[in-house]
Image (tube, rainbow, N blue to C red):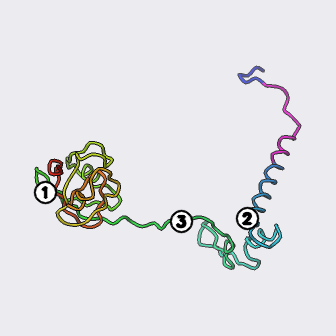
């Protein structure tokens, strides 16, 4: 009988590649165990025993066909994690009042978002050019409040002291009111 599939010879009866693959996996596993135990004074195999569920722990069945709950010693009590975990905190949100030539607009801006970016999201049209704090197109002047514009490289210290701000690289650090479109006032 002819089929659309052609055979490429007889099935191989040599399992050398399979055995080599299994052996490689065993070697890798033993290597991982050795690395995990390299910081302890215990022999190599002891780490596996210490991480196994405690002898005499009871398995409590939950109603239905759900997960099993194991009571007894925590099998992961000795696992050491060597990583830096940054705390997950929500960004603070501040009220930013923008006094534009078209009128006053108020937006809620997180402290990790540039004021210009948030204003654009809210549909407020503000001037900008470089979006990197390297020009004066987006200049404004702080009326009240504080902000962080440490990313800017254009304004001189005296201009910052006078309250000028580049909205493209300014983060609010409190509720703030900014008079926008102040590029002409810089010079």
Do the CB atoms of the residues marked 2 and 1 lie less than 8 Å apart? no
Sequence-wise first label, 2 or 1: 2
Give how far apart the Cα atoms at labels 3 and 1 are.
41 Å
Q: Estimate the x, y position of residue 87 in percent, counting from the top left.
A: 48, 68
Q: Estimate the x, y position of residue 148 in percent, counting from the top left.
A: 31, 61
Magenta part of the protein: which range?
A: 7-21
Q: Estimate the x, y position of residue 130 in percent, counting from the top left.
A: 30, 43
Sequence-wise first label, 3 or 1: 3
- Name the dominant secondary structure of the magenta segment: loop
- Which residue carries the number 3 mark? 85
In the rendered image, the residue lying farthest to the left is: 102
Q: Is residue 144 above or below residue 141?
A: below
Q: Residues within 10 Å of mark 2 (few under 14, many from 20)?
A: some
Residue at 15% in and 47% down: 184
- Which residue carries the number 1 mark? 104
- Which residue carries the number 2 mark? 36
Q: Is residue 120 magenta?
A: no
**Image quarter hosting the N terminus:** top right
Residue at 73% in and 64% down: 36
């Amino acid at each position: 009988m002819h089929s659309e599939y052609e055979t490429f010879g007889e099935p191989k009866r040599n399992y050398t590649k399979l055995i080599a693959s299994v052996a490689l996996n065993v070697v890798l596993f033993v290597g991982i165990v050795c690395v995990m135990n390299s910081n302890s004074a215990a022999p190599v195999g002891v780490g596996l025993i210490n991480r196994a569920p405690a002898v005499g722990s009871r398995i409590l069945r939950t109603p239905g066909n759900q997960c099993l709950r194991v009571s007894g010693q925590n099998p992961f009590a000795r696992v050491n994690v060597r990583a830096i975990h940054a705390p997950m905190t929500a960004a603070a949100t501040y009220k930013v009042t923008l006094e534009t030539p078209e009128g006053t607009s108020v937006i809620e801006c997180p402290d990790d978002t540039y004021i210009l970016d948030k204003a654009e999201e809210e549909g407020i049209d503000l001037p900008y050019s470089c979006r990197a704090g390297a020009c004066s197109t987006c200049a404004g002047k702080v009326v009240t409040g504080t902000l962080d514009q440490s990313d800017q490289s254009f304004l001189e210290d005296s201009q910052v002291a006078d309250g000028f701000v580049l909205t493209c690289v300014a983060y609010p650090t409190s509720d703030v009111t900014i008079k926008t479109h102040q590029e002409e006032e810089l010079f």
